[in-house]
Image (cartoon, rainbow, N blue to C red):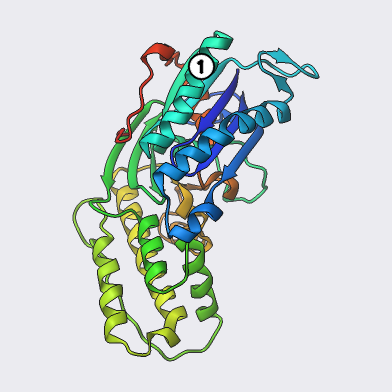
């Protein structure tokens, strides 16, 4: 089965083609998807000057890019609409992110998907954007890294991005339940706002990470401490608004903070990482899971990935630790197509006439 995925929930216009590979066995998820093409047109350079995504600007860019991006994805996969080139398969279904996200951006992708589904007479599969991030872990990996282990259920999944910070319990395909989420700001948003306060620019995650790394390579005597919000709470919820406030007040009190930007960046990043890891480990123990998975754009943070791996290896050596490849952490359509493939296996289609955008769609 071959799926065309489309993603326009924020500021990336993306299209991808995937097909299923492997066989399913009891209690695990050996079935994965192979990516035939994955095209992403990013708007980062456009939104940099605003310090964040401007919804109307993003939507207009999607309108300009959506058809060229889809055509490129089909061409790279060897597919010309519903015909074939070089014996490539036809498209069997379209997977489209219909929420959550920016409503005007989502509408561009959804209306395009509905039109193609009607024109090609193929089924359509609505995908929750967060679910798409989770299914990035089911894309066949291109690395031999021994961290890429077989996914066994049940699994705890931490999804961290610019708009979402969420812990989910996944008992199987189609059985995903939210067990904790942010009460205010997402971790990715916290990185962006923290970076802005430190004068490091947008996007904030890579900027802060770069400064933090430069601090760790130096010998410095500063000892800045920031809080770890809700790290000891009894639930699995998150909160990062207080951390932003703490950074703001620290900078206001410190007349020499501009000379300490790398240290502030390191401490700010570490505070976020500590909370994410602590909550995830606590959830994994409570639900006695077999696998821990990470997903979302913030998972591209190498310090987060390395610290997670080390702690799981030391504290939960019997639990598999699965990470998506870096190229599938930020918004892309391959993850939407992957989620669509597993939904298609369960015949979870929606008539194109009934497909709606929901910018507050819950997992």
Q: In this view, does 25 lie to the left or right of 103?
A: right
- Give percent across and percent down for residue 34: 64, 31
Closest to the observer, 196 or 274: 196
Q: In which quarter of the image is residue 316?
A: bottom left
Query: In the displayed image of the protein, which residue is found farthest to the left?
Result: 234
Above or below, comparing residue 329 to residue 359 in the picture: below
Q: Which type of secondary structure does the marked residue at label 1 adopt?
A: helix
Q: In this view, does 160 lie to the left or right of 279?
A: right
Which residue sits at x=48%, y=36%?
8
Note whether residue 209 is visible: yes
Residue extending furthest toward the top: 121
Q: Pick whichever, 270 or 193, lies toward us.
A: 193
Where is residue 236 drawn, in percent x and y?
25, 50
Q: Is residue 348 above or below residue 71?
A: above
Give the left or right position of residue 278, taking residue 195 as reference.
Answer: left
Label 1: how many residues lie within 10 Å, few (<14), some (14-19) or many (20+)?
A: few
Q: Nearer the viewer, residue 150 or 174?
A: 174
**Left of 353 or right of it: where is 253?**
left
Q: Is residue 25 visible?
A: no
All told, the count of numbered labels is 1
**Residue 31 in picture, x, y percent from top left:** 56, 28
Percent coordinates x, y for residue 330 in the rendering? 51, 47
Residue at position x 28%, y 60% in the image = 240
* 39 to 271, vertically: above or below: above
Image quadrant containing the N terminus: top right
Q: Mark 1 points at which residue?
A: 115
Q: Quadrant of the C terminus?
A: top left
């Amino acid at each position: 089965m071959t799926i065309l995925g489309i993603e326009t929930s924020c500021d990336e216009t993306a299209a991808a083609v995937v097909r299923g590979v492997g066989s399913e066995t009891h209690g695990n998820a050996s079935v994965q998807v192979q990516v035939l093409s994955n095209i992403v047109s990013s708007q980062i350079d456009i939104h940099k000057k605003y310090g964040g995504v401007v919804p109307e600007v993003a939507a207009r860019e999607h309108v300009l890019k959506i058809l060229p991006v889809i055509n490129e994805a089909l061409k790279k996969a060897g597919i010309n609409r519903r015909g074939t080139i070089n014996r490539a398969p036809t498209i069997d279904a379209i997977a489209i992110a219909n929420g959550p996200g920016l409503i005007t951006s989502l509408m561009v992708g959804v209306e395009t998907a509905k039109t193609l589904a009607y024109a090609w007479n193929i089924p359509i599969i609505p995908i929750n954007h967060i679910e798409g991030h989770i299914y990035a872990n089911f894309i066949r990996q291109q690395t031999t890294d021994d961290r890429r282990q077989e996914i066994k259920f049940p699994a705890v999944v931490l999804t961290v991005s610019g708009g979402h910070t969420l812990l989910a319990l996944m008992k199987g395909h189609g059985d995903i339940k939210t067990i904790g989420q942010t009460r205010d700001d997402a971790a990715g948003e916290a990185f962006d706002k923290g970076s802005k306060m430190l004068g490091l620019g947008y996007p904030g995650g890579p900027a802060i990470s770069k400064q933090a790394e430069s601090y760790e390579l130096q010998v410095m005597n500063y000892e800045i401490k920031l809080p770890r919000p809700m790290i000891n709470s009894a639930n699995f919820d998150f909160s990062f608004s207080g951390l932003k406030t703490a950074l703001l007040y620290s900078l206001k009190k410190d007349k020499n903070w501009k000379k300490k930007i790398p240290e502030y960046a390191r401490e700010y990043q570490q505070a976020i990482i500590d909370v994410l890891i602590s909550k995830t480990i606590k959830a994994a123990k409570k639900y006695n899971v077999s696998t821990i998975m990470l997903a979302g754009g913030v998972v591209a943070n190498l310090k987060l990935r390395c610290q997670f791996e080390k702690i799981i290896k030391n504290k939960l050596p019997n639990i598999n630790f699965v990470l998506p490849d870096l190229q599938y952490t930020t918004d892309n359509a391959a993850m939407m197509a992957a989620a669509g493939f597993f939904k298609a296996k369960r015949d979870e289609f929606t008539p194109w006439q009934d497909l709606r955008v929901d910018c507050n769609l819950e997992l």
